[in-house]
């Protein structure tokens, strides 16, 4: 069974891609809704939260975990992955690789949480692949917009937030933008409208594709979803974001 982990709803972007590519996989999703957002916390706190949440997924029998959270992938994985009992697949390398091969002018932007941007994890991964110019920008409000349902294409709050954050990227010459936080694809229409012609790379989707390519597991398409708080709210928000109800009842596991 595969684990999928995020601080909240954002990992659903990776979960959807996983289920689209491999509907037969058995998946256990955990969203740490009691403690979202992670992206404004200190490194120590992110590592502690991640250790506890990933520990829960291991205790339920997962054999590998897709860390569908840019913040945990950037800040905690380098620390946790080497000694972890099951493989942890983060979003940084798969997204960097896809962006590198997508970009024609090798000028690549990254938007993510504050903690991710400070870690420079995406830049490091991109520069390891070859000569690139990078521009990164923290957009922490996008997480709250996604968690609170301000995502519909015409939403004036989302439009204002995009207008607040993205102008520096518009002038930067990027032709490809990594959505380095898995919540951000939920605002993709607004981001695209602000940056016409720029290709968007969803970090969670890129990691899901990489995981499918390297994971030989087969299953029966079972899905279980746990959150650390307010399961009914998660169910409601997930249905709004996915346009259909989750095919399973969301359960609570308090860390
Ligand atoms: N979805 C997350 C990420 O990819 C977490 C955002 C947050 O909790 O601040 O970074």
Image (spheres, grey):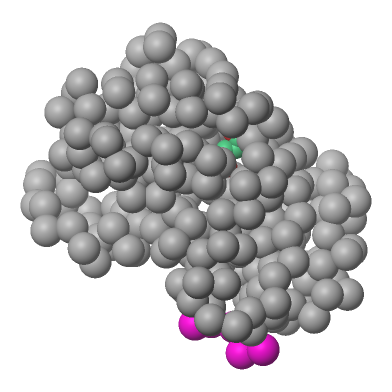
Is 198 one of the magenta-colored residues? no
What is the x, y in percent for residue 32? 47, 24
Q: Which residue occupies 61% across, 58% down?
A: 179
Residue 121 can be seen, yes or no = yes
Instruction: Count up the numbered dots.
Output: 0
What is the x, y in percent for residue 69? 49, 42
Q: Which residue occupies 88% across, 64% down?
A: 168
Is 204 drawn above or below residue 214 in the view shown?
A: above
What is the x, y in percent for residue 52? 38, 20
Judged from this view, the residue extending furthest toward the bottom is 104
User: Which is nearer the eye, 15 or 60?
Assistant: 60
Q: Is residue 200 left or right of residue 162?
A: left
Q: Which residue occupies 9% across, 52% down?
A: 218
Q: Name which quarter of the figure residue 53 lies in.
A: top left
Q: Quadrant of the C terminus?
A: top left
Q: Is residue 199 left or right of residue 174?
A: left
Q: Quadrant of ligand 1?
A: top right
Residue 239 can be seen, yes or no = no
Q: Which residue occupies 20% across, 34% down?
A: 85
Is 104 one of the magenta-colored residues? yes
What is the x, y in percent for residue 231? 45, 18
The residue range painted magenta reads 101-105
- Magenta stretch prevailing secondary structure: loop
């Amino acid at each position: 069974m595969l684990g999928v982990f995020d601080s909240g709803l954002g990992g659903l972007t990776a979960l959807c891609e996983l289920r689209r590519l491999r509907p037969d996989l058995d998946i256990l999703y955990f969203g740490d809704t009691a403690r979202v957002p992670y992206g404004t916390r200190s490194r120590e706190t992110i590592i502690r939260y991640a250790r506890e949440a990933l520990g829960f997924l291991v205790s339920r029998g997962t054999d590998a975990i897709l860390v569908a959270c840019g913040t945990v992938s950037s800040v905690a994985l380098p620390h946790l992955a080497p000694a972890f009992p099951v493989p942890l697949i983060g979003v940084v390398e798969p997204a960097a690789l896809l962006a590198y091969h997508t970009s024609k002018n090798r000028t690549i932007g990254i938007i993510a949480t504050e903690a991710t941007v400070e870690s420079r994890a995406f830049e490091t991964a991109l520069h390891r692949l070859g000569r690139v110019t990078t521009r990164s920008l923290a957009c922490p409000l996008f997480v709250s917009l996604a968690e609170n349902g301000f995502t519909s294409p015409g939403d004036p709050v989302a439009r204002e937030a995009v207008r607040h954050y993205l102008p520096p990227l518009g002038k930067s010459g990027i032709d490809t933008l990594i959505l380095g936080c898995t919540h951000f694809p939920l605002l993709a229409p607004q981001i695209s409208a602000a940056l016409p012609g720029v290709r968007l790379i969803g970090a969670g989707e890129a990691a899901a594709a990489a995981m499918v390519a390297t994971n030989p597991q087969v299953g029966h398409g079972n899905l279980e979803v746990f959150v650390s708080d307010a399961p009914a709210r998660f169910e409601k928000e997930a249905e709004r974001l996915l346009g259909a109800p989750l095919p399973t009842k969301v359960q609570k596991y308090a860390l």
